[in-house]
Image: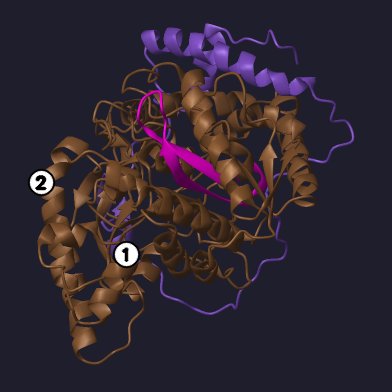
Amino acid sequence: MSAGVSTASDLTRLTAAQTGAAIAAGEISAVETTRAHLERIAAVDARVHAFLHVDAEGALAAAAAVDARRAAGEQLGPLAGVPIAVKDVIATSGLPTTCGSRILEGWVPPYDATVVRRLREAGVVVLGKTNMDEFAMGSSTEHSAYGPTHNPWDLDRIPGGSGGGSAASVAAFEAPLAIGTDTGGSIRQPAAVTGTVGVKPTYGGVSRYGLVALASSLDQAGPCARTVLDAALLHEIIAGHDPLDSTSIDSPTPPVVEAARAADVRGMRIGVVRQFAGEGYQPGVQQRFTEAVALFEDLGATVVEVDCPNFDYALPAYYLILPSECSSNLARFDGMRYGLRVGDDATHSAEEVMALTRAAGFGAEAKRRIILGTYALSSGYYDAYYGQAQKVRTLIVRDFDAAFAQVDVLVSPTTPTTAFPLGERVDDPMAMYLADLCTIPSNLAGNASMSVPCGLSPDDGLPVGLQMIAPPMADDRLYRVGGAVEAALRDRWGHLLIEEAPPL
Amino acid sequence: MTSSASITRAEVAHLANLARLALTDDELDHFGDQLAVIIGAVSRIGDLETADVPPTSHALPLTNVVREDVVRPGLTQEQALAGAPAAEDGRFRVPRILGEEA
């Protein structure tokens, strides 16, 4: 932060930590930074389409409230007055929450998710809601009922998914921070393909109260940012025990901010997952990953190869567990108490209205997964599919346990390829599912994982993500390792990778 | 379970009915083909020997999760009905539940 900050476009280029510090020091106001980001959204979002709803009035009012509290001498937290974008799967009272679906078009929740309540209490300014694949099912945002988000690095390519809107908003400098949710990679894969930082905290580390459920045993909200420290500052605000979520962990949040500042891997043991390489991995992705592994050794870590044989079965197990939970969770969208209703013309029964409503309100991917889940849970198939998938889940947890007995963190590419062109996989579900190959095991085991940028792929000039995985409640290790990689690469390049994104 | 597991169009129609999804003929054809591919791919998990492996339903199981039994405000009637597709006399209005013959 320097006195050189004067124009609105400068304000959008600051990190969240810098913005918070500048507001605390009285150099800029929360209203000024909020206005700068709203102007940026107005200028570029017609092309990026990261946002489904922008709440200019609410954001400016929240920012003015922060400025007033500051003027009254109140000591506020490090992100007070800093703008944020929130994925549209998280309930925001008074602001539409559609989950990227027609079935919830125009729905305004009567309550805030715990994550949102914590943000508001910390003075973080909610700019609006971001685009996503319908009910968080997808890896490209093309399954949004409201049209896809475009990758700020190349507008003809996918921004990842399901949280493509959150990642793109951060990559396009429309917001310094965003909230994402990650069920199989929906924070980390978008971070990887947009050159940003994304963290899936330990399952239960961040409350799911008010997060519209896709797969309750896998869903986890977490931070999206342009730097590791910014992600840590946001992580610290949203994490912690919540009595309203019975799966919330009742123990202190790991020291993530301290770890991000330490950014030191000396003496750490880092494991390369042998299973995440080979066929299907883009050569440029593999190259940048190999270089990142070499960097760890330069920085004083010990690198070993680790075998996780059951990871080969993670993707098929996930595509049985997820649809099963999804078909159950999405049963609540029946056109009776909220959302869309179709065919209520006094001739159709309630059951027919439900079927017509769901047919009109859900998109193709939601329908596919609901049918798949209904199939996997059917009597006669239950043991072979859902039951067997739950046993495979145990084997994956055991692979992680064995690996973490040898190493402090595991690393892999975040996703096998860089951002693919819009349209390429939209009607090819299996090809789309492969984008989450490396991220899924972490959701199945409930541990913590992060993606940080590790360079541009030499084959196409697009960002590559490095994934780190740490044991449950050892989220701080991710920040220690991610911070070290980020600092070393920034020294090498002279700037963050995101600074190389073409101007919009 | 074999890796040649497949799914017929009639099965897809039955499942769609169970899931309360009024699919079109085109959707039944298209999803049937796609689901056969997906089911073929996921059936691979049947190759693993798991007789002695317990299932995991939750990554980090917690038991006996309780909280203080204190009264806290819920939604008002107005809030609860605010998103309803149809409301009448302070209640959700729903289509008829019973069939014509009932």
Q: Nearer the viewer, mark 2 or mark 1?
A: 1
**Residue at left 40%, top 19%?**
A425
Q: Amino acid at mark 2?
A: Ala
The secondary element bearing badge 2 is classed as helix
Along the line of sight, the residue nearer the viewer: A495 or A311: A495
Q: Which labelled disc corresponds to residue A319?
A: none
Residue A58 shows in the view? no
Counting residues from the start of the chain, the first of labels 2 and 1 encountered is 1
Residue picked out by circle 2: A43
Indicate how the structure is coloured in the image: by chain
Residue A184 shows in the view? yes
Q: Colour of chain A?
A: brown
Along the line of sight, the residue nearer the viewer: A291 or A473: A291
Toward which corner of the image does residue A397 lie, by quadrant? top right
Along the line of sight, the residue nearer the viewer: A8 or A69: A8
| Residue A444 sits above or below residue A10 on the image | above
Quadrant including the N terminus of chain A = bottom left
Instruction: Indicate left or right for A211 with A496 as reference.
Output: right
Gap between marks 2 and 1 measured at Cα:
21 Å
Toward which corner of the image does residue B78 lie, by quadrant? bottom left
Which region is colored magenta? A443-467
Along the line of sight, the residue nearer the viewer: A254 or A406: A406
**Label 2 chain ID:** A
**Residue at left 52%, top 42%?**
A466
Instruction: Indicate left or right for A316 with A263 as reference.
Output: right
Q: Which labelled disc corresponds to residue A16?
A: 1
Q: Which chain is purple?
A: B
Q: Amino acid at mark 1?
A: Ala
**Residue A404 in picture, x, y percent from top left:** 75, 51
- Would you say residue A350 sits in the magenta stretch? no
